[in-house]
Amino acid sequence: MAYNEALAARVRAALGEFDSHLEGAIIANESQLQQEDEPMGDLSERLQDTLRAAGRRLTAQRRLILQVLEANDEHLDAEALYGRVKARDPDVSLATVYRTLAMLREIGLVEEHRLGEEHGHFEAVRDEPHYHFTCLRCGDVVEFGTDLVAQIEQELRAREGVHVVSSQLHVQGYCARCQATQD
């Protein structure tokens, strides 16, 4: 019986150390998550306001999906986005990613671009308009800005009396690298 009590005491001590270590890891992880979320403060407020205005709730999964899009410089398709989101939250399903993308696109927080492919690529809406060039050989996408589209919109408004809501410009061709290998 004394042996069992000694063993139980050692197990309790080990569990106490484990709990202490685990608590420290949880606190460190929460601190890291807060630091990661700090730059997204504006995002979270904007997202919450926009979702509320659309009669939707801000869930942790919706926030995470938009955070991954905001933090990414690439144009992710739904599968690639799913992979990155799932790495941060294994409970997110591909169906949730698709539904969330559709909803975020519907309320104007996400744009979908075809970029010369049959499936969509997604990015968070930005304050400044930008456009895309896609290389037909390697598939590289180059984002660029230009005042010419705004000038075209202004001329169209003046001439036709229309109200332009959005503009998309997608240019296709061959990037400099592919042109060099083609010669």
Image (tube, rainbow, N blue to C red):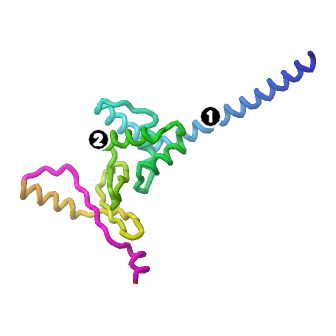
Reading the image, the residue beneath label 1 is 27
Viewer-closest of 130 and 176: 176
Residue lying furthest bottom: 183
The residue at the point 42 percent across, 48 percent down is 78
Q: Position of residue 158 (x, y in %)?
A: 8, 57
Depth check: give the residue in front, 50 or 133. Answer: 133
Q: Residue 21 sits in which quadrant?
A: top right
Task: Report the Cα–Cα distance between label 2 and label 1.
Answer: 37 Å
Residue 93 or residue 75, whichever sits in front? 93
Residue type, label 1:
Ile
| Quarter of the figure with the N terminus | top right
**Which disc is residue 106 wearing?**
2
Please rate how many residues cluster around mark 2, counting C-alpha atoms within 10 Å: few if below 14, some from 14 to 19, many from 20. few
- Tell me the element at label 1: helix
Q: Earlier in the sequence, mark 2 or mark 1?
A: 1
- Left or right of 19, for residue 171: left
Can you say whether 109 is above or below 135 in the image? above
As shown in the figure, which amino acid type bears the numbered disc 2? Glu
Segment tinted magenta in the rendering: 161-182
Mark 1, Cα crowd under 10 Å, few <14 / some 14-19 / many 20+, is few
